[in-house]
Image (cartoon, rainbow, N blue to C red):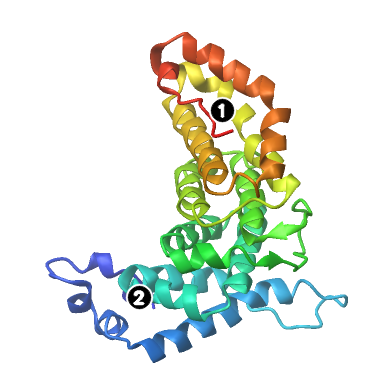
Amino acid sequence: MGAALSYESFEGTATISEAHPFWSVVTSLNEKDLVFLGHSFCVLLRNCVEANNTYIPGSQKQLSCHVELLLLLYKLVDANPKLATVLSKSCDISGLVSALVYVMYVDTQAKTGAISIATFVLHALSKETAFALALSRPFTLTLPTKISSFNGNHFDLLLVAAYQLVVLTEGPWASALNEYVFATLKNVAYHCKVTSSVASTQLVGMLPKFIPSLPSGAEALSAVTHILDIINILLLCDFKGSSSLVFAVLRGQSLFEELSKLQKQGGECGKLELQLVM
């Protein structure tokens, strides 16, 4: 399997399909096969949540290869983008997103590398409009984690997970994923709305981590710009339905006043666009 996954190691090949017979098959799968493949991945990846979400520990067998499954899924989506489309339109996106978020949360402690792969999978899926629309479905599952409880949709779940990764997880390995996290949120924000006050508060609550580093950090400037863009997109697309986000912005007035002062000082901070759609 390792040789099949590492198709980049086959030098001198014009296309992925020429690198290995396995990838030749993957790139030529028809829609029926892709649907079967997508459903199978959803069922297998949901196992890590379902096996740990029972009243009787050990009552359901848990697979021990979810990291390898995630890696294989990411490679398959990378090799055949049609799989991302099929996953978004024909598969249980709610279960898949819940499983990916659960893996991301657990891996902040285990640090097996699954959090990176889960982030890359979400980023690949976020380019699909059907995936973004599916995130509007209500989130009713209780994840077996200490992640903040809330009432909302799956986009709210992504925001809560993003806060967990961006703000509460320390280390350069986590900071390197921030760009992918923000890009994922921006991709889907055009088709989603925030319905949870918890998610809204945590979206605005990402700003305090980066504001102190703004005068001297390009990474902080990029992060603050992304957060402001996401807030503006959500307000622009559905202002009336974003009352919780409007309230969170008003509560965080001091943060925006501080950003305004930094913007007036010029330099890199002068590039900030602080005008919110209110």
Query: Which tag, 2 or 1, sits closer to the chain's start?
Result: 2
Camera-nearest residue between 251 and 242: 242
Callout 2 secondary element: helix
Numbered badge on residue 210: 1
Residue placed at 52% from the left, 14% from the top? 262
**Residue positioned 47% across, 69% down in the render:** 130
Based on the displayed image, in which of its 4 quarters is residue 253 positioned? Answer: top right
Residue 219, how many percent across, how many down?
Answer: 45, 30
127 sits left or right of 43 in the view = left
Task: State the quadrant of the C terminus.
Answer: top right
Measuring from the top left, give residue 113's x and y in whole percent.
Answer: 52, 57
Labelled disc at residue 82: 2
Task: Report crowding for label 2: few under 14, some 14 to 19, many 20 or more residues within 10 A (C-alpha).
Answer: some
What amino acid is found at the position of numbered circle 2 in the picture?
Lys
Vertical arrangement, residue 143 with respect to residue 257, above or below: below
Q: Is residue 64 left or right of residue 120?
A: right
